[in-house]
Amino acid sequence: MSAKRLPFFKGHATPLLFITLMNIAAFPAVIHAQNCTTCVGDRVALLAIKSKIKEDPKGLMISWNDSLHCQWEGVTCNPNHQRVIALNLSDGGLLGSLSPSIANLTFLREIQLQNNFLSGEIPPEVGRLLLLQELSLYNNSLQGNIPASLSNCSSLQLLDLSQNILVGNIPASLSNCSNLRSLVLGQNNLVGKIPDELGSLLMLNQLILPVNNLSGGIPRFIGNLTSLEILSLGKCGLGGSIPDVFHRLSNLTFIVLVENKLVGSIPPSLYNLSSLEILLLDDNRLTGRLPTNLGSMLPHLQALSIPDNHFTGPLPTSVLSSPNLEILDLSRNNFSGKLIITSREACNLVVLYLGSNHFGSGEDDEMTFIEALSICKNLRMLDIGYNEMKGFLPYSLGNLSNTLSFLSFASNAFSGGLPSSIGNLSGLTSLDLSNNKLTGTINQVNFSNLGSLQKLDLKNNSFSGNIPGSLGNLSLLIELDLGLNEFNGSMPSSLGNCRRLITLSIDRNNLTGEIPRKLFELSTLSISLNLGGNQLSGELPQEVGNLKNLNEIILANNRLSGDLPTTISSCSSLVNLDISSNVFQGTLPSSLRSLRALQTFDASHNNFTGKIPTYLEEIPLENLNISFNGFEGEVSSKGVFANASTVSLVGNSRLCGGVPELRLPKCHSTNPKRKNWRRFAVILAIILVAVLIGIAVVVFFVFYRRKSEIKDDVSHEPMTRESLIQVSYEMLYKATDGFSTKNFIGEGSFSSVYRGNLDADSGIVAIKVLNLHRRGGSKSFIAECEALKNARHRNLAKVITCCSGIDFQGNEFKAIVYEFLPNGTLDQWLHDVENKLPRLSLLQRVCVALDVAYALEYLHGHAGKTIVHCDLKPSNILLDEDMVAHVGDFGLSKILQPEYTITQHSSSTGVRGTVGYAAPEYGLGSHVSPSGDMYSYGILLLEMITSKKPTDAMFRDGLTLHHYAKKSMGVGALEIVDPLLLNDEDENLAMRKNERDF
C-alpha cells in the first residue's frame, strides 16, 4: 500500500506542475504586452498588507522597503508583466490581521499564509480575486464566518482554512467553485450540515472535511459525484447512517468515515465498489455482519479497518483469504466463531488485529489458521488477544514470518506448554502470552535467538521450573513480566545483563535465595521492580542505591531480613516503596528523609522498632502503613499523620497520642512530680495568656492605624519553615552584572532569563525578569506565582524567591528567582544545531519523559488544586546536573477549582500555549483542562523520538507531526525515528534483522 496510491496521505496541496500549467493557460498573449504602470497598484497593496502586521519575528518583511516589490521576500511576479501572482509568507509567526487590500492584487493565483498568528476575519474582498487558485490560511487564529464571496473565485482549486476559530455554516455558494479539488475546513467550530449545493461539483475528485462539528448525516448527493476518488469525512460528528448511494461511484478507491457516531449497517452499494482499496470506519456505532463473499466483492481491498464498532457474526473466510489485503483491523467488536483461511498462493497481510472480540469455537483444530498464515511473508503484527480461544499453541507458530514484530495471544484460555518453535521468530520485539492457562517450563525456548525482543509478558499463567538464564542475553529487553506463575529456584543473576530494562516483575512465584546483587546494577530501571510474593531471603543489598531513577520497589511478602540499607535514600525517584511482610529490623534510617517524591510507603508486618521518625510528617506521603511492628512513643499530628484514613498504625502497642480518629491512648507521664509541674505550668500559662490579652487590647488601641496590616498578616497562610529570602532590584542588578548579555540565558513570550549569583548561600540562580511592557506580562507573573506558591515536587522548577518593586528609573519591576539548572533545556539537547552537546540516548529520553509525566500527575491530581500548565514544550523543560527533568515557566498556567466542571468555567481568551503544542480544542474556544496538557505531552513524546519540532518546515499542507507519526505506522516506524538513536553499534545488528520494525 504505497503513498502514491493513497493521495490523501500526501496532504491537500495542488502539485506545483499543475499550478504552473494553469498559470500559463490563464494569461492570454495580450497580457504580456501590458505596460507595468499598473504594477504601482500591486506595490501599494503589498505595503497595505504589511501595515496590518504588528510583529514579524522572522523578519520576512524586512526586504519590503524601497526596492522593487517583485524582489521582496515571499512575493512572486510574472516575469513578463511584473504583476504579483503569488504571496507566500507561511511559517513566519506573523502577528496581525489580513488586509482587505489583498484583493487589489488582481493577478494573484496563490496565497499561502499558513502557520502564523493572524487574527480577525477573512476579508470578503478576497472574493474579487477571480484568478485565485490556492488559498491556504490554516493554523492561524482567524475568526468569523467563511465569506460567501469566495464562491466568485471560480478558478479556486485548493481551499484550506483548517485550524482556525471560524464559526457558522459552510457557505452553500462554494458549489460554484467547479474547479475545486481540495476543500479542507477541519479543526474549526463550524456547525450545520454539509450543504446540498456541494452536489453540483461534479468534477470534484476529493471531498475532505476532517475534524468539524458538522451534523445532519452523510448527504445523499455524494452519489452524484461520479468523479469522486477520495471520500474523507473523518471526525466530523455527522451522525446518522451511511446512505445507500454508492452505485455510480466507480472511481472511488478511498473511504474514511472514522469517529462520526454512525449507526446502522454498511449499505449494499458500498460493498459493490469493486475499485475500493481503503475502507476505514473506526470508532462508530455500526452494527450487522460482514457479507460472506466480501473478499470477492472487493477484490482490490488493501485495508479494512472497522475497530470500536458493534459488528457481530463470524469473520468471512473470503476476507482472511484475500490475496491483496494488507491491513485488517477488527479490534473491539463482537465478532465470534472460528477463524478459517482457505488455501491460497499469495498473502500480503502486514497487520492482522482481531483482539477484544469473541473469536473461538472450542474445536480441536481452531488454531489451524496459524499454519495458513505462514505464507504471509510480510506479516508484522498479529493480535488475537482478549478472545475466547482455547486449546494448545501450535508448533506452527515458529513458521510465521521472520518480519513478525508484534505477537499477542493474551487473555484467552490457551493451555499446554510453550512451543519451542517460538524461538524461530527472530524478528519479534513484543511477545504477550499473559493471562492464559499455559503450563510447563520455558527452558525449551531458545531465547538467545530472540535478540530483538523488547517486551516479554508471560504473567498470570502456570509456568514452573527455573527462570532460564538465557533471558539475560536479550540485550534490547525493556519490559519483562513473569509474575503470577509458579517459577521456583533462585533468580538468575544473568538478568543483570539486560541493560535496557525499565520494568521487571517476577512477583507471586516461588523464588528462593538472595536477590542477585547484579540486579541492582540496572540503573535503567525506572518504572517498577516487583519481586513481591516470593520466598526470597537475606539482606537487601547496599547496591539498591544505584536505582536512582526507579519509580516503584515492591519486595512485600518475602523473607528479607536485616536493617533497611541507608543507601535506599539515593533512590530519589521513588514514589512507591513496599517492603511489608518481611523480617526487617532496627529503626527506619534517617536517610529516608531524602525520598521527597515518596507517596506510598508500606513497612507493615516487620520488626522495626524505636520511635516513628519525625521526617515522615515532612514527606508528602499519601499512604503510610507501618502497622504490626514495634514502634513506640508519641504519634505526630502533622503531615500524613493528620489524616487517619491515610495512615495505619495498628499492631504497635506502645504508641500513643496522634489525632483522635486513630484511637490511640493518651500519652501520660508516670512521674508524679512531673505531673504536678505540668499542672502548675498549665495554670501559669492561663495567667500569662490573660495578661497577654490585656496587653494586646492596649496595643490594639495605640496602634489602631495598623489594623488592616495586622489583619492581613493574621490571614496569611502559615509560612513554611524555610522563609523566602528578601531580594530587591538592586540585589538582582548586582547579581547579574547589570543584567549583562554575558549572563543572558534565554527569553520567552513575557520574560528574559539571566544567570546570577546572589550570595554564597544561594549560589548560582536563574532570574526570570518579566517584560511588563508587553501585554500579559503582569498577568503572567501573577499566574506563575499563584501556581507555584504551594507546589512542591522534585520535577518542578524550584522557586527560591520573587521580587516586586521598582528599578533605578522608577519603573515597575517584577522577577522570579529559580534554582539554576546547569544542563539547560530539553529543546537545546534535542535540536543542538552546533553539535556542542552529546546526543540524548533512548534511555535518557525515556527518563525525561517519565519525569515530565510525574510532574503532570502531581499538578493535575496532587497539588491541592488542579493546575493546568498550558504551555508544555521542550524549551520549558529544564535539566539538572543529573539530567533529571524539571517543568518550568508557569506564566500561562491556570488553576482549576475542586468543583471544576466543563460548564462552570468560561473558555480562556485566545489560544493558550504554543503553536504546534497547544491542544486543538483550545483553538476552538474550549475550556482549559488537564487533557490539554496531555495532548502537549503526546506531541512532546513524538518530538523526543523523531527530533522534529511540530513547527518544522516539512509540516505544511495539512501534514502535522501527529499525522506524520500516525502515517508511518503503515510503512515502518523506524523511518521517522531520530537516526541518532539507531546509530548505536549494539543496536544496529538487531535492527538490521528486523527491518522496518513495528
Image (tube, rainbow, N blue to C red):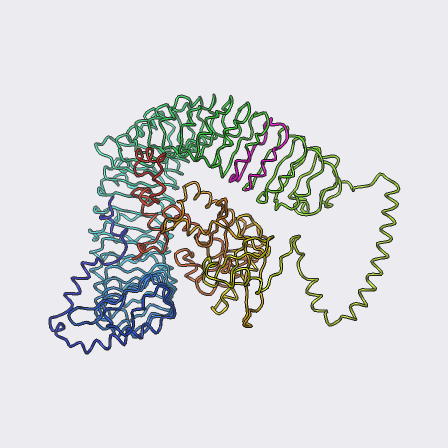
Dividing the picture into quarters, in which one does residue 921 lie?
bottom left
Query: Horizontal placement of 369 versus 629: left or right?
Result: left
Residue 831: x, y in percent?
Answer: 38, 51
Counting the numbered discs, the total is: 0
Residue 647: x, y in percent?
Answer: 66, 42
Report if residue 965 lies within the magenta region.
no
Q: In the rendered view, would you say 419 is above or below 228? A: above
Report if residue 557 lies within the magenta region.
yes
**Image quadrant containing the C terminus:** top left
Q: In the rendered view, would you say 590 is above or below 463? A: below
**Image quadrant containing the N terminus:** top left
Residue 727: x, y in percent?
Answer: 60, 61
Does residue 547 show up? yes
Query: Horizontal placement of 210 versus 250: left or right?
Result: right
Residue name at image x 33 percent, y 50 percent: 964
Q: In the rendered view, would you say 31 is above or below 162? A: below
Residue 45: x, y in percent?
Answer: 28, 75
Q: Relative to the observer, which residue lies in front, 689 or 744?
A: 744
Q: Which residue ends up furthest to the bottom in the rendered image?
A: 37
Q: Relative to the observer, which residue lies in front, 582 or 351?
A: 582
Does residue 166 show up? no
Query: Horizontal placement of 77 versus 750: left or right?
Result: left
Q: What residue range appears in magenta?
A: 544-572
Q: Relative to the observer, which residue lies in front, 2 or 995?
A: 995
